[in-house]
Every structure is written in C-alpha cells, then in structure tokens.
Amino acid sequence: MVAIALLVLVGAVISFPVWAQNAGPPESATWNGLKGDVFGQKTIEPANGIVSIDAPKRAEDAAIVPVDLHFKTDAGTGRVKTVTLIVDENPSPVAAVFKFGPDAGVTHLATRLRVNAYSYVRAIAETEDGKLHMTETFVKASGGCSAPAMKNTDEALANLGKMKLRVFSSKTSGMEPMTRATEMQLMIRHPNNSGLQMDQITRYYIPAHFIQGLTVSQGNRLIMSMEGGISISEDPNFRFEFDAKPGEDIKVEAADTEGKQFKDEWPLESSSL
C-alpha cells in the first residue's frame, strides 16, 4: 500500500495554497482521487468514536508534526486491527500502515510526521468486522518533506538503527497484571530521508532512505507492525499503550529501504508494570 502511494513522488514541489488566508480549508480533491487507490471500492464510514486523532492546527516544525491516535473497542465491531495514516498533500500520502496483534489491546499510538503543505491528516481504522472508520484533522504546515536533516550525514550513519525503549508504568488500580495496560516509547535513530531533501554542499538530492518495516512483539505475540514511508519523521518515534504481560521481553525488529536490519530486546519486569 505504501509502495503504491510512493508513485505520487513525481511533481513533489507544492506551491503555497492560494486559500491559505481564508477562514477554513477546502474539501480535499486529493483525497477523493486517492482513496480508491488505497482502499478500492470499500465504504469508509465516519469514525464514530472508534478512532480519534489529535495534531496541532498549525505545526511549529513541519518536519516533526506530532500525531496522536486513540482507539476504542466497540462491542459490536470488536478491536481495531489495522490503521492507515494518510497526509493528503504529501508527495507520498500514505505515511504508514499499522497492524495490531489480536490480543495486544493497543488503545493509543503516537508518532511524528512530515507535512509538506497545508493538508488533512487522516486515520482510517479497520475493525474486526472488516469495516473502515475514518477521522481527520487539518494541519497548517509547509515544506516538511524537503526540510534539511537535523543531523549531519556522518552522525546519522554512525548511529544508524540504534534503539531506545522507555516504559511508563501504569497506575491503574484493581487490574490483574496480565491485563494491565502499559505505555511505551520506542525511538530509532535513522535519517528517514524522504528523497526530497537537498545536500547543502553538493546541491544534489539525497536518495530516499527510510525505515520500511517495523515489528514490536512481546514473547511470541505480536504487539504491532508497521509498513512505513517517507512521511515518518527523522529518528522515528512511536509511543503506544497495550496490554503487557510481566516477565516477557519486548523485541523490536526493523528494516530500511537499503536492506539493513536492526534488532533489539529489553526485559520487562513485573515491577515496571
């Protein structure tokens, strides 16, 4: 799915929108043309509280726009099994597709995106009954996909693929350890080059080079996986809440577009839950 969206890279230079000084955004003609390519003829229903999205209305930094997603399990539809994150006006609109394990209990996911022009940012969740539910928010940002990297090339390569995991202990009382939700933050050092950034010395475009695949598991069960694209910011960062099992290690495997593989593992003690 992300690979299909990458075809939109042609014509990536986007001018400042004429309507920018108006009160509100127009309907997205881009989305009307895009949704069939991504989801075919499937009906996309309103979110109805199953998925919600939060992002700044005007981004401080278009290359690092925080996006928060929350999921609610509905008795009629069951859990959210996948969510597709889309930035309408980006050269490659599909930022990422996340899949969640059947017993992971993921209720929250946050990451950081590049936003190239004033755009709707959308989250389309697929529930167990096969239905799609969409929510969106409008973000005012410009130039995120072509913004220069924050780190120089030598530093980025020296730390390529290094990972860090932070655990935020749950304070929920009255819950058994096997069902207690735990929040974690995964940080991966990687330039995630978009292919639209220019080397400030050579004045040539830097080839696209980004984290393409990611899997987070605990023991032998899947927590979540991701198929990513150029819209995920430099040094990918994911914060997520799920149902953790004490005593089972957290494992992360990632792969980038150059075929490099990165792995790490952390113990999860009962005391941290």
Image (tube, grey):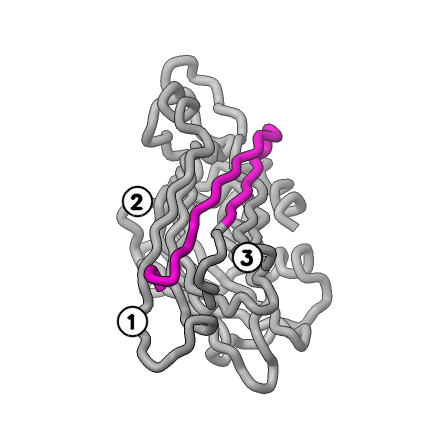
Image position of 224 with respect to 6: above or below: below
Mark 1 vs 3, N-terminal side:
1
Query: Pointer 2: what residue?
Result: 61
Task: Tell me if residue 196 is in the magenta stretch.
Answer: no
SS of the residue under disc 1: loop
Contact between marks 1 and 2 (CB within 8 A): the answer is no
Q: Mark 3 packing: few (<14 Cα in 10 Å), some, or many (20+)?
A: many
Q: Residue at x 37, y 52 (%)?
A: 185
Q: Residue at x 29, y 71 (%)?
A: 171
SS of the residue under disc 2: loop
Mark 1 vs 2, N-terminal side:
2
Q: Quadrant of residue 152?
A: top left
Measuring from the top left, give residue 177's x and y in whole percent.
42, 71
Q: What label sits on residue 171 in the rendered view?
A: 1
Q: Residue at x 44, y 29 (%)?
A: 160
Q: Quadrant of residue 257?
A: top right
Q: What label sits on residue 224 in the rendered view?
A: 3
Name the foreground residue: 206 vs 13: 206
**Does residue 121 appear left or right of residue 5 in this picture?**
left
Name the foreground residue: 21 vs 93: 93
Kindly identify the amino acid type of the residue bearing the numbered disc 2.
Asp
Q: What label sits on residue 211 in the rendered view?
A: none
Q: Is residue 228 visible?
A: yes
Q: CA distance from mark 1 to mark 3?
A: 23 Å
Q: CA distance from mark 1 to mark 2?
A: 33 Å
Task: Tell me if residue 264 is in the magenta stretch.
Answer: yes
The C terminus: image quadrant: bottom left
Mark 3 vs 2, N-terminal side:
2
The stretch of residues the image draws in magenta is 251-273
